[in-house]
Image (cartoon, rainbow, N blue to C red):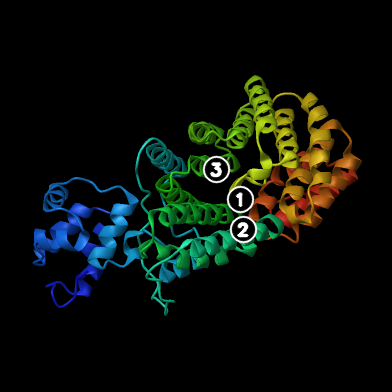
Amino acid sequence: MNTIGSQSSPVTPDVWDQQEMRDALARREISAVYRLLRRHGVSQRQIAALTGQSQSEVSEILKGRQVMAYDVLARIAAGLGVPRGYMGLAYDEATAVRVAATSEAPHSEEDESVKRRKFLAHAAAITVGAAVFGTDSGSWASSPAQTPAPGRIGMTDVRQVEAATRALRTLDYQYGGGSCRDAVVAQLSWGQQMLGANATDLVKERLYVALADLHNLAGWTSFDTGLYDSARNHFGQALGLAKQGRKEELVANILYRMGRVYLHQDAPDDALKVFQLGQLAAQNSGSALAVGILCANEAWAYAKMGSDTQALKLLGRARDEFARANVGEAPAWAKFFDANDLSAMIGTVHTELAQTVDVKYTRTAVPALTKAINGFGEEMSRSRSFNLTSLSINHLLDGDIDHGARMGRQAIELSEGLKSVRTKDRMIPLQKEAEKRRNNPDARELAERVAKFTGSDSAA
């Protein structure tokens, strides 16, 4: 196939670097891209031949019809010779360098609530129909030499992506997102080049799912390191790919994870909306485990809002769905949710209720958290840290300050070996409870240790 800039084309590659064209590509406004190409002397017939579209399709797009489907966008980019990163379709190596190296700060003046609404609208569109999440635009890093993309891929290539994702996810669980996020992004820089390779329909569908889960992990590790905009971007791309791969169970998992970002940001209303959207995908998938995960997290959102009736009802349903689930055959992205994690969620929800509704809920929280902590091995260090923190809070609420301080110290000692911003953030409520009891030397020492670990202020 001829590409723009070849001997048969009147357009040279520098056209893609002109600002007006770059802006149109970044927004994925294909109608604007086509109009600009026409301005550079490319005929409707040439565009159709290069992109594999009919002239009538090109005509409709020129008149303003939007192009949303990921595979169509990818085919247009490949046919015209557009650098994939310019359209945010996949992480090439240059994109990987930029994403891995930049912090969140320069990104956004947009209010967080506006971003949440935009993501929810995108997630709703993905869940009920085809849509693609637009990536951010901005300056691009100069591209280093890239490993050539394969011209054709088979199932073995896809299995390599899946194996890399499993290995990197193991590192995330044990050492925190900061231990592997850059490696995940680097893996994406290679894996997504495969989207332009030739493959059977079966291989392509599985590749969509594999890359969706890799983006899912990139979003999760970004979240764990406090890079919320990057997390949202990765989760958004993961949704589009999971939908392309027709994997509703993965769509549900991605939405559960994005909802967790909003819970962490103390936005339970928005979190609940995302969880409920995920619940639609979970039910469509027929996976009892996916439904159970969403129910447990919806319960957490209701607990944060102080609604114990709804929280307990959903926890009960989560237990029922888990009992029906075949955990042994769970996909890689859901294998974490075993009996230990269910106990952890029960303990977490009751810890939240003990803080928002009635201290009596510590009576259920303490044994559930203890069971989870005892069940988690070293490979789940971050989960153990979270649960030790929650257990410490419960003991402080119960008046057992000595035991609470001991659990809190264990949480800090474990978290010091993790590269996870979330472990620090999750200790802020513990610090507040310890501060309330500063007259007790154990509580005062705990408050000061947490403050030192998290870098937050402690009362003098």
Secondary structure beneath disc 3?
helix
**Residue 199 placement: quadrant:** bottom left
Amino acid type of the residue tagged 1 in the rendering: Ala
Q: Nearer the viewer, residue 450 or 255?
A: 255
Q: Quadrant of the N terminus?
A: bottom left
| Mark 2: secondary structure | helix
Relative side of 45 to 397, left or right: left
Q: Check disc 1 and report the residue beneath it.
A: 332
Give residue 133's position: percent from left, percent from top: 38, 49
Q: Secondary structure at mark 1?
A: helix
Q: Nearer the viewer, residue 171 or 418?
A: 171
Q: Dots 1 and 3: beta carbons under 8 Å?
A: no
Cα distance, mark 1 to mark 3?
11 Å
Residue 253 numbered mark, or none: 3
Which sits earlier in the primary sequence, circle 3 or circle 2? 2
| Amino acid found under the numbered disc labelled 3 | Asn
Q: Which numbered disc covers residue 401? A: none
Q: What amino acid is at disc 2?
A: Arg
Location of mark 2 (residue)? 166
Across and down, in percent, residue 131 comes to 34, 44
Instruction: Estimate how packed mark 3 is, as few (under 14), some (14 to 19) or many (20 or more) residues with alpha carbons within 10 Å.
Output: many
Which tag is nearer the camera, tag 3 or tag 2? 2
Q: Does the residue at mark 3 contact the one at mark 2 (Cβ under 8 Å)?
A: no
Residue extending furthest toward the bottom: 145
Q: Is residue 337 visible?
A: no
